Image (cartoon, rainbow, N blue to C red):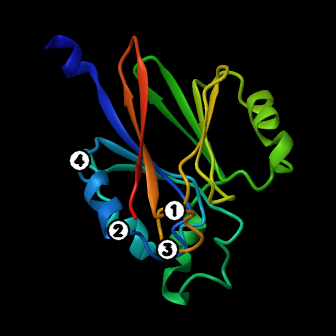
Amino acid sequence: MIEEAWKIRVALLSDTHGHVDPRVVEVVADCDYAVHAGDVGSATVLKAIRPRQRVMIAVRGNNDTVDKWPVAEIRTLKTLPFEGTLDLPGGHLVVVHGHQAGDPEVRHDVLRERFPEARLILYGHSHRRVLDLATTPWVVNPGAAGRSRTYGGPSLVILEASPDEWRLEERIFE
């Protein structure tokens, strides 16, 4: 039972493009933290994502630009960084959108080279779910959590982090 107390649940999501699936919102509400890997699309999405601890990290994607966000929300857009870090039991998570990490065939190598100290690197951009756990740092793309190019349905990944173990669970909604 003591081990359970040390587990932290983190919702990993990306590529909402202005709309987050309500089922994703429901899963996020059962997590301690949320991390969004860019192409958020609007402040409305950020307000909808409400983890238990009310801690969320979101980064800017290649579509998070002044011309693509609602004019009234530009101030929020400008607060989004291009990369972020979340310190967790057993290591830290780095989040970027991934569009500046090269072509898909080299992207994971580039990210691992750029962030060797991370335990997990979260990225988005491609809308394709990938859990590359072959080596540390892990490289994870949770797929799209909105309705644009979801490739099988809106999705996210749940990270359970404790000092001794990290586990990932994919959630895909048809």
**How far is disc 1 from disc 4 in space, using C-alphas?**
23 Å
Residue matched to label 1 = 152
Q: Disc 3 residue type?
A: Arg
Q: Residue 131 got which mark?
A: none
Residue matched to label 4 = 30
Q: Disc 1 residue type?
A: Gly
Q: To which quarter of the image does residue 111 belong?
A: top right
Q: Position of residue 5 (x, y in %)?
A: 19, 21
Q: Position of residue 32 (x, y in %)?
A: 29, 41
Sequence-first tag of 2 and 3: 2
Q: Are marks 2 and 3 in contact (CB under 8 Å)?
A: no
Q: Nearer the viewer, residue 135 or 89?
A: 135
Residue matched to label 3 = 147
Q: Disc 2 residue type?
A: Lys
Question: Which circle, 1 or 4, is nearer the viewer?
Answer: 1
Residue at horizontal 84%, vertical 43%?
105
Question: Which circle, 2 or 4, is nearer the viewer?
Answer: 4
Question: Which circle, 1 or 3, is nearer the viewer?
Answer: 1
Q: Please, is residue 124 above or below residue 64 in the view?
A: above
Is the C terminus in the top left, top right, bottom left or bottom right quadrant? bottom left
Kind of element beneath mark 2? helix
Is the N terminus in the top left, top right, bottom left or bottom right quadrant? top left
**How far is disc 1 from disc 2 in space, using C-alphas?**
25 Å
Residue at horizontal 67%, vertical 75%?
65
Question: Which circle, 2 or 3, is nearer the viewer?
Answer: 3
Q: Pointer 4: residues within 10 angstroms few (<14), some, or many (20+)?
A: some
Q: Residue 47 got which mark?
A: 2
Kind of element beneath mark 3? loop
Kind of element beneath mark 1? loop
Question: Which circle, 4 or 3, is nearer the viewer?
Answer: 3
Sequence-first tag of 2 and 4: 4
